[in-house]
Every structure is written in C-alpha cells, then in structure tokens.
Amino acid sequence: MDITDDLDAIGLLCPLPVLKARKRLAALPTGALLRMQADDPAAIVDVPHYCHEAGHELVSTAQDGRILTFIIRKV
C-alpha cells in the first residue's frame, strides 16, 4: 500500500482531526491514500462517519494503545 500523505492529529480533540483530514484530502488527487494518526477517542466514530458522508473510502482502522491509525482513500 503506497501512502500518499501522512497526517499527525495526535493531541487534537474533536472536531479538529476530521477538519484537518478534510483539508488534507482536498489537496490530494483522487485515489490518494492518507494515513492519519489520532488519539482522540471520538475519532473512532468521527472518521468513519466523515468518510461515509464525504464519499471517501476508509481502507483500514488500527489501534495501538491510545493511537488510532486510519487509512483513507480519496474518492
């Protein structure tokens, strides 16, 4: 999997991780993969909801301790 861009949203609280992901994805070409890391517990609900609403594909979600990692494909 070729990650196009990384977004570090660790330490940011809702709604900032989703807002930063939206801004970053807007600058990427269609098909690009964004890897976002966040530690806000609300991100586990907010990021999938955002992807569904915006039409992006949530490729994967992983958790390592308090760190959540999302891979999002821009559609």
Image (tube, grey):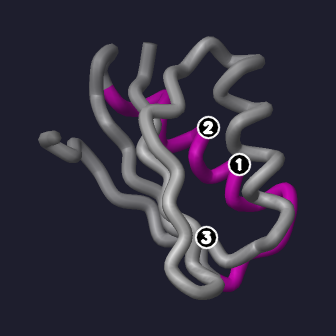
Instruction: Give the structural element (helix, strand or loop) at label 2.
Output: helix
Q: Nearer the viewer, mark 3 or mark 1?
A: 3
Indicate left or right for 68 with 54 as reference.
Answer: left
Q: Residues within 10 Å of mark 3 (few under 14, many from 20)?
A: many
Q: Split into 4 quadrants, where in the image is the C terminus?
A: top left
Residues marked 2 and 1 touching at CB (< 8 Å): yes
- Gap between marks 2 and 3 measured at Cα: 14 Å
Q: Which residues are magenta?
A: 11-28
Instruction: Verify whether residue 24 appears in magenta.
Output: yes
- Placement of 58 over or under 23, stated as above or below: above
The residue carrying mark 3 is 38
Instruction: Give the structural element (helix, strand or loop) at label 1.
Output: helix
Point 29% across, 50% down: residue: 5
Q: Position of residue 2 (x, y in %)?
A: 13, 41
Q: Split into 4 quadrants, where in the image is the N terminus?
A: top left
Point 34% across, 58% down: residue: 6
Amino acid type at mark 2: Arg
- Gap between marks 3 and 1 measured at Cα: 10 Å
Amino acid type at mark 3: Ala
Point 61% across, 70% down: residue: 38
Res 40 label: none
The residue carrying mark 2 is 22
Amino acid type at mark 1: Val
Q: Position of residue 57 (x, y in %)?
A: 50, 22
The residue carrying mark 1 is 18
Indicate left or right for 43 with 74 as reference.
Answer: right
